[in-house]
Amino acid sequence: MRAIHRALPLLAVALLSVAALGAETLRFQPPVGYSQDFEVEVSGAAVARGDYIQFHGNMAMNQTVQGESTDLAQPIPIEVTILDGEIYYNDKMKPPRYIGDPLAAERTPLGQITSVSEQLDDDDETGIDVTAAVLYASSLLVFPERETRPGATWDGSHDAFDPYGDYVPVTAENRFADMLELGDETLIQVDSEGRFPYHTEIDERTLQGTLQYYLEMTLDRATGTLRDAKLKLYGELSTSGPIGMRISIQVRELNVHIKQTEARILDPEAPSDSSE
């Protein structure tokens, strides 16, 4: 029996050592000049002021890293540019907003967007802005401060950046779903599920409500940068006041799929308009 008792602490140490090997520190830490092109597909359906709206379309987007930081409290400057796109609301096409107009933003090493240079506005007709939805997809998930491992969950509740110039309290549970070895790179898969309060303007009136979401993201382990993301949003917004004055938007489903198409390192000393 004494030999068995001696063996138990040794076994516990061995198990702890194996567990430690599987621990990962998830961080957004790309090098300066890291530039990514993304293809964005959107689709969904909503009822706005009694009218049924189906929307679908695509966008091309770039994100370029302008600085570095290892301090969790020090954000990393990035630049986000909508390059092109077409969004159809029923049969009416509207291009995404801010095409060609770079938005300066900041993202912490935990992945949280803390600011964007230009406050966004919603569409006065539908109350739905796809550009804002894409930015929401980038601000809903944050990494844990401590090490984690595949299969683990953590409380992802935080104050997320609101593309309309404010912050909203997100209630979420995040999960380290899987780790994939693909050739010379390792990818990690993380999920986030939760809800957040949302407001928009339509007919010069404020609509408020709660949106729920489910987000799946595939990230590069080394840099914490996005490879693929799928976001689903749904919920209902409405105004308060007399029934005759009531306006509502039911977001039955808003799907955003973001996929990296190219990544490269840009020379920070090179002119920004260089085509070589």
Image: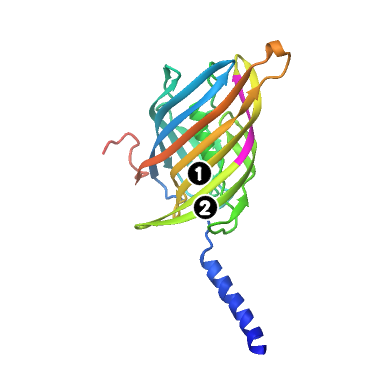
Quadrant in which the N terminus is drawn: bottom right
Question: In front: 110, or 33?
Answer: 110
Q: Quadrant of residue 208?
A: top right
Give the amino acid type for the residue marked by disc 1 in the picture: Glu
Residue 201: where, in percent of width, then height? Answer: 60, 20
Q: Which residue is mark 1?
A: 216
Image colouring: rainbow
**In the picture shown, does residue 161 fall above or below 173?**
above
Q: Which residue is mark 2?
A: 177
Quadrant in which the C terminus is drawn: top left
- Labels 1 & 2 near each other (Cβ < 8 A): yes
Give the amino acid type for the residue marked by disc 2 in the picture: Ala
**Which residue in the rendered view is the most extreme toward the right?**
242
At 61% from the left and 35% from the top, the residue drawn is 212
Residue 93: where, in percent of width, then height? Answer: 41, 18
Residue 141: where, in percent of width, then height? Answer: 56, 44
At 54% from the left and 53% from the top, the residue drawn is 176
- Give the magenta-colored segment's residue range: 194-201
Q: Judging from the image, what secondary structure is the residue with disc 2 in?
A: strand
At 67% from the left and 15% from the top, the residue drawn is 246
Q: How many marks?
A: 2
**In the picture shown, does residue 205 fall above or below 35?**
above
